[in-house]
């Protein structure tokens, strides 16, 4: 009798697990189909670099599952994160670095007649190698400089125990500071709180001072987001903002409605919460990752809650978002060699 009960319990458990897995699979197929419909509703052409859509743009480089973004407006350039470098202290062989690809793109885009590049500023959103690791290579190149680099001071109290032990955050921070010091590039740790003008864009940093209540939630809780405005159009570059870190709840109302969202934390678990998306209501979402690596719950929130088309920098080989003088956002793809 006991054996029969155990057998029945195993059958029921197997049936429940199979039913749940099948339901999740069917839901995922439905979400993908709906998401593809949204994506197909937004025209995106291959980039021709003829500036037919204007001079005000955000370049989202293809650095796989890392962030490297360039703001361009009226001949001015700013660098937001740098992508993965070639010497990640946490995972030395797991992912390739993008030092050559990023430096080549920067030089082809922003070099003057003498082959020199000068950014108005660079911003390291937080001390994770997949965001700032490539700063070391970029600013070791004597042809590339910046008027200043915005970078919060590293605070080990913000990190989780796992990060503090094995992720090399402090090592990354010190290596970058060393390069910037050698190049005599000023490092600004007290970030501006007020909106400021950059070409035709109005910019505002979000989370310039890490709130005490998120200390210990991980270095992602130090992330600095950037609001980019031109005319009636707004983008939010969410760095590694997540719901788990507490930043989405703290700053959602300060960010408000946006037209374009660079989704936080590459679409991994805990990012782009439903409550956050109901506040920011993006019409376009860009993910710095492979489309297949976006977590199912994040994909669901972006598709079913925000109803936003999601474009992958990896799938599209980089994306440029033009902010036109006609108050439109125009997307182009295939921006990298």
Image (cartoon, grey):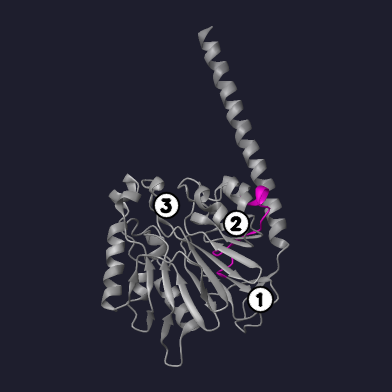
Q: Earlier in the sequence, mark 2 or mark 3?
A: 3
Residue 12 x, y percent position in the rendering: 59, 21
Is 304 contained in the magenta span?
Answer: yes
Q: In the figure, residue 25 lies in which quadrant?
A: top right
Asked whether 176 or 18 is in front, the reply is 176
Which image quadrant: the N terminus?
top right
Residue 37 x, y percent position in the rendering: 72, 56
Q: Which residue is mark 2?
A: 256
**Magenta segment range?**
302-319
Instruction: Give the side of residue 214 with respect to residue 272, left or right.
Output: left
- Please rate how many residues cluster around mark 2, counting C-alpha atoms within 10 Å: few if below 14, some from 14 to 19, many from 20: some
Residue 107 x, y percent position in the rendering: 45, 82
Instruction: Give the side of residue 179 with respect to residue 259, left or right.
Output: left
- Please rate how many residues cluster around mark 3, counting C-alpha atoms within 10 Å: few if below 14, some from 14 to 19, many from 20: many
Identify which residue is drawn at 61% across, 26% down. 15
Spatial distance from mark 3 to mark 1, Cα to Cα? Answer: 33 Å
Give the numbered dot on residue 221: 3
Identify which residue is drawn at 64% across, 75% down. 46
Residue at the far front in the pictured view: 194
Asked whether 142 or 89 is in front, the reply is 142
Q: Label 2, secondary structure: give it.
A: loop
Is 139 contained in the magenta span?
Answer: no
Q: Which residue is mark 1?
A: 324
Q: Label 1, secondary structure: give it.
A: loop
- Please rate how many residues cluster around mark 1, counting C-alpha atoms within 10 Å: few if below 14, some from 14 to 19, many from 20: some
Q: Earlier in the sequence, mark 1 or mark 2?
A: 2
């Amino acid at each position: 009798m006991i054996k029969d009960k155990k057998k029945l319990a195993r059958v029921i458990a197997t049936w429940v697990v199979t039913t749940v897995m099948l339901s999740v699979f069917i839901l995922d197929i439905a979400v993908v189909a709906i998401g593809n419909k949204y994506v197909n509703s937004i025209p995106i052409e291959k980039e021709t670099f003829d500036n037919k859509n204007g001079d005000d743009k955000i370049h989202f480089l293809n650095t796989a599952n890392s962030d490297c973004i360039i703001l361009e407006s009226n001949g001015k350039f700013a660098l937001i994160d740098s992508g993965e470098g070639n010497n990640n202290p946490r995972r030395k062989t797991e992912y390739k670095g993008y030092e050559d690809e990023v430096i080549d793109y920067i030089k082809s885009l922003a070099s003057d007649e003498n082959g020199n590049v000068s950014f108005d500023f660079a911003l390291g959103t937080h001390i994770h190698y997949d965001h700032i690791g490539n700063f070391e290579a970029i600013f070791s190149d004597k042809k590339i400089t910046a008027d200043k680099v915005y970078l919060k001071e590293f605070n080990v109290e913000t990190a989780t125990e796992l990060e503090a032990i094995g992720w090399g955050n402090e090592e990354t921070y010190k290596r970058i500071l060393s390069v910037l010091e050698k190049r005599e590039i000023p490092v600004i740790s007290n970030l501006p709180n007020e909106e400021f003008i950059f070409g035709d864009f109005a910019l505002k940093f979000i989370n310039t001072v890490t709130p005490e209540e998120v200390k210990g939630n991980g270095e992602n809780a130090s992330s600095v987001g950037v609001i980019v405005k031109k005319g009636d159009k707004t983008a939010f570059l969410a760095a590694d903002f997540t719901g788990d870190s507490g930043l989405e709840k703290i700053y959602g109302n300060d960010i408000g409605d946006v037209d374009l969202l660079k989704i936080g934390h590459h679409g991994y678990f805990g990012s782009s919460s439903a409550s956050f998306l109901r506040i920011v209501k993006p019409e376009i979402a860009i993910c710095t990752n492979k489309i297949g690596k976006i977590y199912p719950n994040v994909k669901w929130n972006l598709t079913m809650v925000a109803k936003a088309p999601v474009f992958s920098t990896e799938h599209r080989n980089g994306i440029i978002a033009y902010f036109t003088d006609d108050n439109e956002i125009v997307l182009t793809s295939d921006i990298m060699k």
